[in-house]
Image (tube, rainbow, N blue to C red):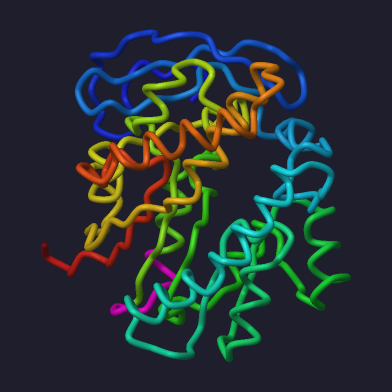
Amino acid sequence: MSDSRTCPACGSADFADLFHAADHLVTGRQYLIRKCNACGMGWTVNPPAESDAGSYYVSEEYISHTDRKQSISDYLYHIARSFMLGRKKRLVASVTGKSTGLLVDIGSGTGYFASYMKEKGWQVSAIEISEPARQYSLARFGLVALTPGDIKSLTSGSADCMTFWHVLEHLYDPSDWMAEAARILSDSGKCIIALPNFSSADAEWFGLRWAALDVPRHLWHFTPEAFRSFAGSNGFVCEQVTPLPLDLFYISILSYRNQGSSLALIRGLLTGAFLAVRNLLSREKSSSLVFVLSKRARGN
């Protein structure tokens, strides 16, 4: 994927080199973002080799792996996450029609969602690439998170739900992971995928300074159209799309902070409020979107 000449979502060879975005977390290096002219999908050109990717997450700033609480924006992140746990649980119950069952959480991070679902009676298998994050999950929650290679051990057709909360954009072979999801899910199982929205109002507002680009950790930059195409090509049907409204405020604050703004919190909240009102007229311009997928019936 280092210098792909075709769109990974729709296969078009009609693309443009959009701009260079900076790694604000670790290296400061610039990475080219390429954009498909057909579906709007973006991708990061020449990211680090997968074998070296782990070093790009080793930072106290990477809050989903460190649980850092040093600034007001950090605390807002944790408050929002706590609020969203209940909402995510209700979404899982709503789309599966089940109050308990088998859930597979891909990219479980420090284990908050997976452990919360276990507390609510779900049987949970958590998958996480980061060793420190797995260790935190075990120490904090007693949650044993598996490594990505362990996904092969999960029984075919066993899961009622699989979740990828802001994970798919990090994966070097997303189609392989979708194939595993199709294998592990029962015929009636649902796959829930949350993604930053590359065609969101805040992506347009901040441009190359949009924090959700998060290069080189984010390899893929999906639009709603591109993700529907990608899901369809991997044997899934998109049943439902819903926004994650609080992400807009966090990403706006972080975008200003990455620019070095001394008023990042205030500017981020004001920009988020302004864009949130605009987004009322177009939900698919939201900063992050949750896609609910079902497996395509055989023969369709």
- Residue 163 point in image, percent of width and height: 48, 64
- Residue 24 point in image, percent of width and height: 69, 22
Residue farthest along the left direction in this orientation: 300
Residue 118 occupies quadrant? bottom right
Q: Is 42 drawn above or below residue 121 in the view shown?
A: above
User: In the figure, is residue 18 to the left or right of 36?
Assistant: right
Quarter of the picture containing the C terminus is bottom left
Q: Is 190 drawn above or below residue 102 in the view shown?
A: above
Q: Does the segment drawn in magenta span residue 186?
A: yes
Q: Is 162 drawn above or below residue 262 in the view shown?
A: below
- Residue 280 point in image, percent of width and height: 26, 46
Residue placed most toward the observer, 191 or 119: 119
Residue placed most toward the observer, 273 or 90: 273
User: In the figure, is residue 230 to the left or right of 193?
Assistant: left
Q: Residue at x 25, y 16 (%)?
A: 13
Residue farthest along the right direction in this orientation: 139
User: In the figure, is residue 241 to the left or right of 77?
Assistant: left
Residue placed most toward the observer, 73 or 285: 73
Q: Residue at x 28, y 37 (%)?
A: 278
The magenta stretch spans which residues? 182-188
Q: Residue at x 32, y 41 (%)?
A: 277
Q: Does the segment drawn in magenta span residue 200?
A: no
- Residue 77 point in image, percent of width and height: 65, 51
Residue 296 occupies quadrant? bottom left
Count of numbered circles in the view: 0
Q: Residue at x 42, y 19 (%)?
A: 4
